[in-house]
Amino acid sequence: MKNLVELDKNHFIHPTSSIQQQQEYGPKIIVEKGDGIFLTDKEGNVFIDAMSSLWNVNVGHGRKELAEVAKQQMEKLAFSSAFSTFSHEPAILLAEKIASIAPEGLNAIFFTSGGSESNDTAIKIARHYWRIQGDTQKKKIVALKRGYHGVAAASTSATGIPEFWSMAGRLMEHVVHAETHYMKGTQIAIQSLREIIEQEGPENIAAFIVEPVQGAGGVIVPSEDYLIEARKVCNEYDILMIVDEVITGFGRTGKMFGIEHFNLQPDMITFAKGITSGYIQLGGVIISDHIHEVLKEKSKGTLFHGYTYSGHPVATAVGLKNLEIIEREGLVENARVMGNRLLKGFQKLQEEIDIVGDVRGLGLLGAIEFVQDRSNHQRFAPELQVAVKVIEALHQRGIICRPVTYEGVDIICFAPPLIINQYQVDTILERLQDAILDVRKQLG
Ligand code: PMP
């Protein structure tokens, strides 16, 4: 039999991974199969996939229905271009379906293959929108510190986690970052947004991009008024608002879109992940009727933007079936109910264990932060690697989730599949308590 560990080390460069760690220890786990909320590795160990892998496997693993629809579509029409207005049924039907579930006034979809491409596309559309109206100056993008928008050119720049610029620089000019609402609250964050806009000149700014809940930055849920205030600022300065729903879209937060928690209308929504629950690559941008009207009227000639796989027939067919499953099984509502249960469990842990600092969540998107001293938010020394240790302790107890450690925080994130039931939530909580207590003991 082939030595998969050696072959991995020799030939597989992993995304967002330490190459040195891989060379020393080999792959962390070789996953063999998935079923529901569970993953099984090559040795037969079973894990709860408490992150839905990369916040994306919303309907859970092993759905034969999705495999079947992909097979049928591949046999009928595996690929056909959507360039030059060629079209096909799955892409048309999925676009119409997304329009029907998207917030009011957002009805036209540009498809991509993932979140990074979606954010790059939204940023280009924002600039294009101003340019075709004769305003070539409005091209800067304002994003938030700790925001994550992907790793393509514009999305790397928009990402507000400096570690992602360490590989090759910030890539795109004209991107500036305002303060996040994390730890600071609405008022300071909105003031910072205003200051940045004033400083850069609103006449130079095309768009503001923001996640409803900052995901990779540490599951940072804004207070209820932050996004509403941000929308007002965008209106006041004539700046488009792009809402990045790559994680929060399609039920994750207990609403179909995360922005529905905050009663406002963005100009564009970017999506990926949950649209196919990760069964196949797909993403896109939902565009407001207003932008669509301007494009229809003023975008002359060819729109020189398109990916070979924009509107891929198999991906869009799977997306359509995936949305059908989410609706048929009431998974948005389940995410809301199970999310509340998970958050209550986190709150109980906070009462019981002193190193549990802030706990938060919205639907099935949750996080726990570890601190040395809760009274003054004092963090642990980074070399103690508290979050990493808890993740490791969870791994030993058959639970996969993910740490966030940028800029000295110790956060662990949870985003289990939306199909999770109350017994499974309780299992996660029991093992979590055990894992934290174990690490607490190690810390002394
Ligand atoms: N935006 C957000 C909010 C994300 O969480 C991610 C991925 N984690 C992306 C964009 C990038 O998506 P992708 O990895 O599919 O390019």
Image (cartoon, helix red, strand yellow):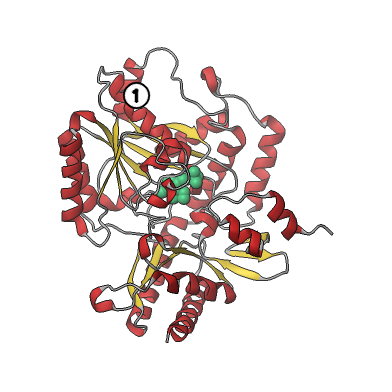
Identify the residue shown where x is 63% and y is 49%.
13
Identify the residue shown where x is 36% and y is 74%.
380
Give above or below for 127 relative to 168.
above
Comparing 315 with 31, the one in front is 31
For the residue carrying disc 1, how many other residues have a C-alpha within 10 Å: few (<14), some (14-19), or many (20+)? many
Mark 1 vs ligand 1: CB under 8 Å?
no
Q: Is residue 92 left or right of residue 155?
A: right
Specify the quadrant that holds the C terminus: bottom left
Mark yes or no: residue 58 visible.
no
Give above or below for 421 relative to 234.
below
Identify the residue shown where x is 15% and y is 36%.
236
Total labels: the figure holds 1
Mark yes or no: residue 405 visible.
yes
Q: Position of residue 274 (x, y in %)?
A: 49, 49
SS for dot 1: helix
Q: Position of residue 237 (x, y in %)?
A: 17, 34
**Kind of residue at disc 1:** His
Q: Position of residue 129 (x, y in %)?
A: 31, 24
Q: Residue furthest right?
A: 1
Q: Which residue is mark 1?
A: 128
Comparing 36 with 209, the one in front is 209
**The quarter of the displayed image where residue 216 is located:** bottom left
